[in-house]
């Protein structure tokens, strides 16, 4: 799951109550469907910093709730307002995400160099999704190689 550190960094989540934040503002149907239909409480999450000086995996988190309507879609003055959404028929969903631990940054450049990750969805050219699936083999490789932040 990608987040811009200026909006929500792994440090921000670790400092939040229960080390948990709502993953709001997703406005892509494929990413929404992934949260709504496939994510389950306890699923592992790679917390990825994007749109920053050095993008990459900054921590490990987990899904902490089932999907529920993203309240930002109803805020008329907000950045994520959607005039077609109603409380009776919400268009956008979110989940709560709980930080498990901060890791040393595993940079995008490093990820691209690893043959074991060659097919990883987030590394595909042109990928703009903020939420992508990580295959079991990729997850295991990453968990083995991610180092705790010191």
Image: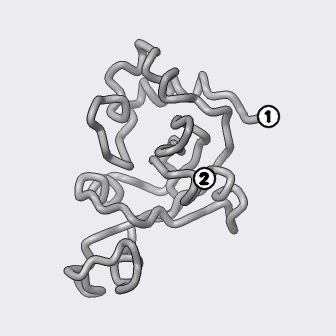
- Which residue is found at the position 68% from the left and 44% from the top? 101
Residue 4 x %, y %:
51, 52
Q: Residue at x 68, y 42 (%)?
A: 102
Taking the spot 35% from the left edge, 43% from the top edge, the residue there is 132
Which of the labelled discs sits on residue 31, or is there none? none
The quadrant where residue 145 appears: top right
**Looking at the figure, which quarter contains the C terminus?**
top right
Asked whether disc 2 touches disc 1, contact meaning CB atoms under 8 Å apart, the reply is no
On the image, the x and y values in percent for residue 112 come to 43, 21
Total number of numbered discs in the rendering = 2
Secondary structure of the residue carrying numbered label 1: loop
Q: Relative to 67, does residue 147 appear above or below in the rendering?
A: above
On the image, the x and y values in percent for residue 89 come to 22, 81
Residue on which the image places disc 1? 150
Residue identified by numbered label 2: 9
State how the image is colored.
one colour
Image vertical order of residue 141 relative to residue 63, above or below: above
């Amino acid at each position: 799951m990608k987040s811009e550190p200026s909006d929500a960094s792994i440090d921000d989540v670790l400092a939040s109550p229960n080390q948990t934040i709502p993953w709001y503002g997703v406005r892509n149907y494929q990413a929404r469907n992934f949260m709504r239909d496939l994510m389950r409480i306890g699923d592992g999450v790679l917390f990825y910093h994007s749109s920053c000086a050095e993008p990459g995996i900054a921590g490990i988190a987990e899904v902490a709730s089932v999907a529920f309507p993203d309240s930002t879609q109803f805020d008329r003055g907000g950045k994520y307002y959607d005039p077609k959404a109603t409380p009776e028929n919400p268009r956008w969903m979110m989940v709560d995400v709980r930080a498990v631990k901060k890791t040393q940054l595993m940079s995008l450049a490093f990820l691209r160099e690893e043959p074991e990750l060659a097919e990883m969805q987030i590394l595909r050219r042109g990928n703009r999704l903020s939420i992508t699936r990580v295959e079991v083999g990729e997850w295991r490789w990453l968990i083995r190689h991610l180092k705790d932040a010191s």
